[in-house]
Amino acid sequence: MANDPPALSREPAAARLTLPPGRRRRWLLAAIAVVAVFAAVLGLFNWFVALQNRNVSSGIAVGAAAPDFSLPDQNGRRQSLHGLMGPKGLLLVFVRSADW
């Protein structure tokens, strides 16, 4: 009779899904341990990010005038901010990239 279908149970589904007290406690302790490890990792990550961003300035304030500077262009000629500035100003975009 190994191939007989299982007998239908009359007990409620919630009763069939409950764990014995010993197993319930182990599952609860395992869930608490997982949450504690996750919280510890998250705390370490936040500490690491704060440590990396300590004493970092993000540049000049919005609306402040940029100091004059000069950099070489792709042909090796020095270009200065003052030399490129037009009557309405200058839009200068710095792009971080790999080697060109």
Image (cartoon, rainbow, N blue to C red):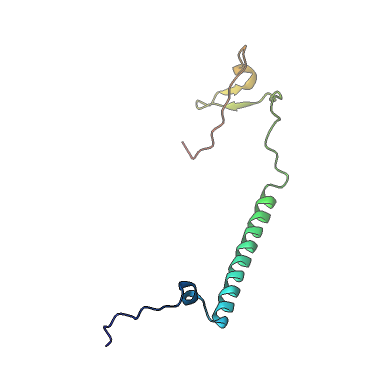
The answer to which of 55 and 23 lies nearer the viewer is 23
- Does residue 3 lie above or below 85 as drawn? below
The answer to which of 43 and 84 lies nearer the viewer is 43
Quadrant that contains the N terminus: bottom left
State left or right for residue 17 relative to residue 67: left
Residue at image location 69% in from the left, 28% down from the top? 62
Residue at image location 45% in from the left, 72% down from the top? 13
**Where is residue 8, by image quadrant?**
bottom left
Q: Residue furthest front?
A: 10
Residue at image location 60% in from the left, 63% down from the top? 38
The answer to which of 24 and 14 lies nearer the viewer is 14
Numbered circles on residues, count: 0
- Does residue 75 lie above or below 15 as drawn? above
* Residue 17 on image: x %, y %: 48, 74
**Where is residue 32, by image quadrant?**
bottom right
- Does residue 70 lie above or below 12 as drawn? above
Q: Residue furthest right?
A: 55
* Residue 84 on image: x %, y %: 59, 18
* Residue 33 on image: x %, y %: 61, 71
Residue at image location 66% in from the left, 59% down from the top? 43
The answer to which of 69 and 56 lies nearer the viewer is 56
Q: Residue furthest top?
A: 87
- Does residue 69 lie above or below 45 as drawn? above
